[in-house]
Amino acid sequence: MTDTRSPLSSDRIALDYGLRAQVRLLPYALAFFGIGLPIYIWSALSFLSPVMLGLNLCLFAVLWLAFFLMKPALKVEGATETLEPEQIDTRLRQQWLCGGLWALGVMVISLNVADSGPDAIIFLTVCAGAAAGIIFFSSPILIFLLTLGPMAMAGPIIALHTLPADGGAGSLAHLVTAGLSLALAFGLVLNRHLREHYLLEYRQLKLSLDREQMLKTRDELSHAQMALMQTLSHEVASAMRGLELTLSQSLSLLARAPAPKKQVEQALTTVNQVLDMVTNTVDDGTARSGRLSVAPEPLNLVALTEELSASFAQMARAKGLEFQLHLPTPLSDGGPDKGAVIADPQRVRQILTHLLTNAVTYTVSGRVSLRYHSAADGYVRLEVTDTGPGLDAAELEQAFVPFARIMRTSSGHAGTGLGLSLSRTLAELMGGRLEAQSTPGLGSRFTLDLPFDAQAEAPLPDSTEPEADTETPANQTILLLADDPLEGAQLRNLLEEMGHRCLSAKSRTRALSLAQQGRLHACLIATNSFEDLSLPQNRDKLEAYFTRLRDTQSETRLRILALLPDGEQAEALSHMGVLPLLGPVSSAELTRALIQSDAE
């Protein structure tokens, strides 16, 4: 709903702030009159009868009671701009009534002793002091100052002027009149100053609220942009991985066709570049929003470097480059089995992949090397060295600036200019550092230092040949349930290239019918999504289907695998005895999955 209220005028703003200031002054006003009460009683004892003094004290008691009863109603919460004009008018009347009672009380008490003779001079002087206090406490609001001030002044001035002129009453009357008039003038000056202060405070509040709203809008827009970027990147990455899988499978069919094979290899390289750009762009946006996170853990850095070296050595050889991997022996003074690097495995892989890709891409001739240094000063160092074109000091500094690319060396190469800046950010998030040295014409050296814990234990490398409890995962009959024709054809070709016999079905009913016709070893489900398994009825229905599917195989236990493009509902499927896989899947990953499910 749109707020259709017109903005408050400067007079209304000053009035609201004045009312608030007067409420804050209430305790001081009551304290002022409380301190003056003993002086008032002392000055009244000399000429007032006990009855009159008691009546005056009763009047004070009534005034104090009225203040305490109305005080809760005078407080207001919220900003000025959220108030209705009617609310301000109501508070104005209430607070004027409270001040009017005190001003009227001072006037009545003063006029009541106007004929009491010279003995009332001190008493009326005290009343004049009370009138000055009312003027001061009325100064935050101009209308109060112009009405309550003269009302409070009138009583003591009139009473002093009615006293006999002898005994100094005449001179005192003129002095009190001048003093109260001067107090009223000072009150007007103070009110003018307070009005300017109120408007300045309101403008500051308005600017603060506007700034908070702008920051909130900016954060919401940033979150929306990041969510959109992540969604789009996920969809693009999924499509690119599917294309990568298709191209990888096509390479095996083009062994005797060099020209098409080269074109497919170039297309595969482009796909990998697009995937890297999407990943770097999303990670850089996440880092800029302060939401990029890492998950450090003990890491087998040797296994990781050996794995990366194997793939990049092949890439380097394809360009006619020499690739070298240097591993120290032992890895530390305590031996290779003691201590471990503490870092996020995926982020370390991301950093090294970028550094090695740059080294191989930009090096025309010579060599690329990856060197692992022993632990020192609590760090382990990885060095990526190349004999590429090299960079001067200004170019090297520019290389770490987001979206900045060195045209002298990067011309003709795809990229976003985010890799090095993102890699340095990731290294720092893991408690490490990324530095570089380069010489034009000689090459570059990038050093990645990662934290090393001598008490941690590095995980054992994954076994590439796990043992199965039953039969080997070759020459098996696998039921493929895929509702997408293209994806089904790709998976069928992949399974047949792995040496398996494949039966295809597009629906669960058809898959169940095929399973009843003969022996099966495994069932691979690639239907992209399952029903919402957080609902008990859906979960029970799917579990009953899996039970019927397994019951078709009396001799062996049917292994069921599910290919999930987004990884959702993996936990629920695991509880049903289904092995979830994150798609798209390669032949090596599928082989490991078949062995794993077989072993279970």
Image (cartoon, helix red, strand yellow):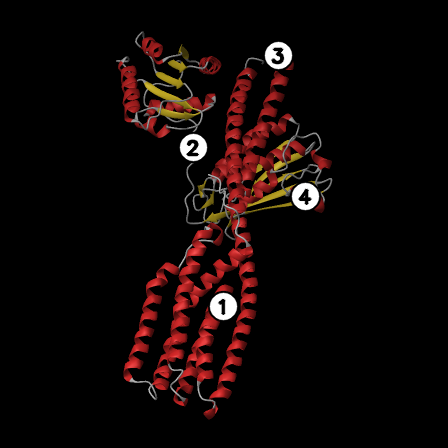
Q: Nearer the viewer, mark 4 or mark 2?
A: 4
Task: Identify the element where label 1 is drawn.
Answer: helix
Q: In front here: 502 or 511?
A: 511
Closer to the N terminus: mark 4 or mark 2?
4
**Residue at mark 1:** 145
Percent position (x, y) of residue 381? 55, 45
Q: Are marks 3 and 4 in contact (CB under 8 Å)?
A: no
**Gap in Å between the C-alphas at discs 1 and 4?**
67 Å
Closer to the N terminus: mark 3 or mark 4?
3
Left/right of residue 532 with respect to residue 312 in the rendered view: left
- The residue sitting at 31% across, 17% down in the picture is 558
Closer to the N terminus: mark 1 or mark 4?
1
**Gap in Å between the C-alphas at discs 3 and 4?**
43 Å
**Gap in Å between the C-alphas at discs 4 and 2?**
39 Å
Residue type at mark 1: give it: Leu
> Is 336 placed above or below 272 here?
below
**Gap in Å between the C-alphas at discs 2 and 1?**
86 Å
Examine the image and state in which quarter residue 418 appears. top right
**Residue at mark 2:** 462
- The residue sitting at 50% across, 59% down in the picture is 15
Q: Nearer the viewer, mark 3 or mark 2?
A: 3
Residue type at mark 2: give it: Asp
Q: In front here: 137 or 105?
A: 105
Q: Nearer the viewer, mark 1 or mark 4?
A: 1
Task: Identify the element where label 3 is drawn.
Answer: loop
Residue type at mark 4: give it: Gln
Mark 4 Cα-neighbour bin, 10 Å: few <14, some 14–19, many ≥20: some
**Residue 257: mark:** 3
Percent position (x, y) of residue 141? 49, 64
Q: Are marks 3 and 2 in contact (CB under 8 Å)?
A: no
Examine the image and state in which quarter residue 599 appears. top left
